Image (cartoon, grey):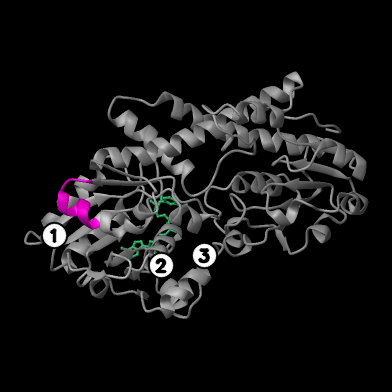
Amino acid sequence: MTAALDTRLGIAKMKIAMIGTGYVGLVSGVCFSDFGHEVVCVDKDPRKIEMLERGEVPIYEPGLDVLMHKNVEAGRLSFTLDLASAIDGADAVFIAVGTPTRRGDGHADLTYVMAAAEEIAKAAKDYVVIVTKSTVPVGTNRKVKDVVAAANPALDFDVASNPEFLREGAAIDDFMKPDRVVVGVETDRAAAVMSEIYRPLYLRDFPIVTTDLESAEMIKYAANAFLATKITFINEIAALCEKVGADVKSVSKGMGMDGRIGNKFLHAGPGYGGSCFPKDTKALARIGQEHASPISIVETVIKVNEDVKRRMIDKLSDLCDGGFNGKTVAVLGVTFKPNTDDMRDAPSLTIVPALVGGGANVRVVDPQGKREGEHLLPGVSWMEDPYAAAEGADLLVILTEWNEFRALDLTRIAGSMAQARMADLRNIYALADAEAAGFTGYESIGRAGYGS
Ligand code: NAD
């Protein structure tokens, strides 16, 4: 270990290279530098590196800019396009590149991970731990080991699996105060490097689960698939609530108070989306099929989630007298959740094209979604102000529950619309609020509505 000891804190200052400066790599790199380590973040996208060198953050993540500036100024954090210089003398190199769904078969596409592994192998000179932070199928770390050994047979190295559990929108808190850190290793030497890197968390009693490579890889997929299942479960219960006259908010509350169930990820909505759940459920289902051990429950979750999104379109259509042609629809929120600019697999990417395709004139308001959303949602008008978007519209749709949309003046909105109808797909208002404000139609998820 080449690390120097910070005697003041008793923490060895590690030298870390972070490959990939996306949502995970950038947050992890910034937070590791805040632990006191020396971190160089690498990306192959010159636009991102230029922005970072200018002090600009390429993604929207609350608090990231402040923490990044602090650590750049302290001399612990830097950015480069040059992978070889970044890993020179590094104790650990983290691979945090994308693992999107491979076209056609649902498998995770490991092209970027393997390319990064090969580049690391060719550039590394001394002992280093190559850590996979990207979400990867079971067995990938062993493949990384083979790729590195083949590309640089003389290199002394270990691999480690260190899946990331942060949530966009709360990423810094999740990284700094994790429920747990998972580390999969094969050797004591790699375990020692990883425990030094995470020592600041260990010292504050955050649990570190140290296990083998395969179990670490499986923990990540199993955790995400479980959460996607929980969301999908409550979405199906919501559909039944609508039929039997129950209120899914009360049902979630009553269920969630059971300590064995818990209240998180139990909010009915328009279907899960985002950069992880859709691709990770598909990848886990695929791994199961390949090993003749199908995870039928996850296969069903994937199908039901598609049904949920389609049900939303029917709901909107019902509120528009059975069709969208010629209607003006104001959509509030298109990112897959609030406090991020990430549009990957957002429910809006299914719902908004159905509106546009059906002949609606669609106005979109999103505090951060425009930059990504502009090319993903052709044919819509982007607006800044929810009130202006609702003016003269036939339907108001709340699709992502940004705080900006939680306390709207509903009376003002209803009074300005051509048809005062609302689809509240995140259950942020109550039916009584809509009625009192003068809406002639209101539908939400798993609760009573009217006017459709
Ligand atoms: P991202 O697409 O935002 O970022 C990936 C970055 O890697 C890009 O900037 C890309 O240019 C860069 N890159 C690709 N190949 C490279 C190479 N050879 N050298 C240098 N840079 C390279 O992806 P993300 O959302 O940060 O996700 C990364 C991984 O983390 C995925 O496996 C994902 O499943 C996992 N993960 C994501 C989240 C999340 O909330 N986004 C949470 C937990 C885990």
Q: Can you tell which quarter of the image residue 22 is in?
A: bottom left
- Amino acid, disc 1: Ala
| Magenta-colored span | 185-193
How far across and down, in percent of the image, does residue 105 sit? 37, 39
Q: Which residue is drawn at the image coordinates 93% and 51% (left, top)?
A: 415
Q: Position of residue 222 (x, y in %)?
A: 39, 35
| 198 lies above or below 295 | below
Pointer 2 local density, CA inside 10 Å: few below 14, some 14–19, many at least 20: many
Depth check: 450 or 66 in front? 66
In-image side of 182 versus 241 (left or right): left
Q: Nearer the viewer, mark 2 or mark 1?
A: 2
Question: Tag 2's secondary structure?
Answer: helix
Ligand 1, image quadrant it occupies: bottom left
The quadrant of the picture occupied by the C terminus is top right
Q: Which residue is mark 3?
A: 59
The residue that label 2 is drawn on is 34
Q: Secondary structure at mark 1?
A: helix
Decide which of tag 3 and tag 1 comes sooner along the chain: 3
The number of discs equals: 3
Q: Position of residue 235 (x, y in %)?
A: 62, 31
Q: Which quadrant holds residue 119?
A: bottom left
Amino acid type at image mark 3: Ile
**Label 3 vs label 1, nearer the camera:** 3
Q: Is residue 283 magenta?
A: no
